[in-house]
């Protein structure tokens, strides 16, 4: 899934509190409140199925649950099924869960925003410090479930609050984490993000053109997480990065979103940018001082579980997006 390419020189940190949207104009915090307890419960509910690895019963049952929750919160749900080939030739029964806002039918002139995350689990804990665990599946509380949990809470809040000025569609990408494991001698960036690659390649041009921008959520619930400005996000959608980081500052969570570049990551946002042509950024945790991985100590280990999910991190990311959507 994720390879950090390079660390780029730091830029000036955005201040907390209110921030300038444009010269002479300040952005104020919105009144709609993201509920971290709710997002945490959505994260735990996914993990109760066990690791959602491709072709497993847990994967199938959790997918049904996610789709039903989006329907419950007023979205029209489409299941994009495809048989995708993994790096090792395994046929992966993939399902991208597409939840479309019904606000579009009420006002087709509303700006349209895409929010996405992957929902499958890594089948191998190949970054675990104990090599005996490398063939074990990952629970994926952070690396998968946290992004979907934040999206579900946003969908719930959008249903309850009709003051939002944008229409929001959600996509839960599948087959993201079947990428080539570390014990293989070669590496293949195309072996990751298979569901996103399929969605992007098959997204009708008129649909892709209808989105102003997209936001990918990946690992947004980790302890002590910080979200740096990812290289490809800056390359393809710098203005959206700036918009989101301003929203974080206005919401009071600027400390979670340092205005520093954190390297390039192979992730679902790349095909969204390169194949679908939708400017899309990646909100993904970055731990520059973690020896085990720049993605944090639980990444692709058996410790990526609910014990290592932090409600404060979920709140920071969730409220930032609520600030963005309602301001």
Image: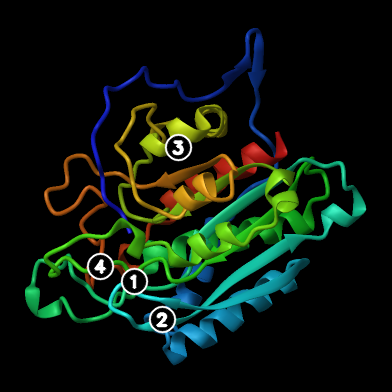
| Dots 2, 3 in contact, CB < 8 A | no
Lateral position of residue 47 relative to residue 77, left or right = left
For residue 223, the mark is none
| Dots 4, 1 in contact, CB < 8 A | no
For residue 180, the mark is 4
Q: CA distance from mark 4 to mark 1?
A: 7 Å
Q: CA distance from mark 2 to mark 1?
A: 8 Å
Position of residue 88 measured from the top left corner of the image (x, y, whole percent): 28, 78
Q: Quadrant of residue 58?
A: bottom left
Q: Quadrant of residue 157?
A: bottom right
Q: Quadrant of residue 185?
A: bottom left
Position of residue 80 measured from the top left corner of the image (x, y, whole percent): 62, 73
Near-viewer residue (115 or 231)? 231
Quadrant (top left/top right/bottom left/bottom right) for the C terminus: top right
Q: Earlier in the sequence, mark 2 or mark 3?
A: 2
Helix, strand or loop at disc 1? loop
Q: Earlier in the sequence, mark 2 or mark 4?
A: 2
Lateral position of residue 36 relative to residue 28, left or right = left
Helix, strand or loop at disc 3? helix
Near-viewer residue (18 or 72)? 72
Question: Which label lies toward us, 3 or 4?
Answer: 4
Q: Is residue 134 above or below residue 296?
A: below
Q: CA distance from mark 2 to mark 4?
A: 14 Å
Q: Residue at x 64, y 17 (%)?
A: 26
Q: Earlier in the sequence, mark 3 or mark 4?
A: 4
Judge the density around disc 2: few (<14), some (14-19), many (≥20) Cα neighbours within 10 Å.
many
Q: Which residue is mark 3?
A: 233
| Dots 3, 1 in contact, CB < 8 A | no
Q: Which residue is mark 1?
A: 178
Q: Which residue is mark 2?
A: 54
| Dots 2, 1 in contact, CB < 8 A | yes
């Amino acid at each position: 899934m994720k390879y950090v390419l390079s660390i780029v020189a730091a830029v000036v940190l955005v201040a907390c509190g209110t921030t300038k949207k444009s010269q002479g104009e300040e952005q104020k915090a919105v009144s709609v409140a993201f509920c971290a307890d709710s997002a945490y419960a959505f994260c735990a509910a996914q993990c109760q199925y066990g690791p959602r690895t491709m072709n497993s019963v847990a994967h199938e049952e959790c997918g049904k649950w996610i789709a039903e929750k989006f329907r419950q919160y007023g979205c029209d749900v489409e299941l994009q099924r495809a048989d995708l080939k993994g790096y090792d030739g395994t046929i992966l029964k993939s399902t991208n869960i597409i939840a479309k806002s019904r606000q579009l039918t009420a006002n087709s002139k509303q700006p349209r925003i895409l929010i996405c995350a992957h929902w499958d689990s890594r089948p191998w804990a190949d970054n675990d410090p104990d090599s005996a665990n490398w063939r074990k599946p990952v629970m994926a509380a952070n690396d998968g479930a946290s992004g979907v949990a934040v999206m579900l809470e946003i969908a719930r809040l959008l249903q309850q609050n009709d003051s939002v000025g944008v229409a929001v569609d959600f996509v839960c990408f599948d087959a993201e984490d079947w990428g080539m494991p570390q014990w293989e001698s070669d590496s293949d960036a195309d072996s990751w993000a298979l569901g996103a690659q399929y969605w992007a390649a098959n997204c009708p041009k008129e649909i892709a053109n209808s989105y102003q921008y997209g936001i990918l959520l990946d690992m947004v619930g980790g302890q002590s997480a910080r979200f740096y400005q990812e290289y490809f996000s800056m390359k393809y959608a710098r203005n959206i990065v700036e918009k989101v980081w301003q929203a974080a500052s206005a919401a009071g969570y600027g400390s979670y979103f340092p205005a520093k570049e954190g390297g390039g990551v192979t992730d679902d946002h790349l095909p969204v940018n390169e194949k679908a042509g939708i400017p899309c950024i990646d909100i993904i945790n970055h731990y520059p001082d973690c020896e085990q991985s720049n993605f944090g100590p639980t990444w692709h280990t058996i410790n990526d579980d609910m014990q290592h999910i932090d409600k404060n991190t979920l709140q920071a990311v969730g409220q930032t997006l609520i600030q963005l959507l309602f301001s």
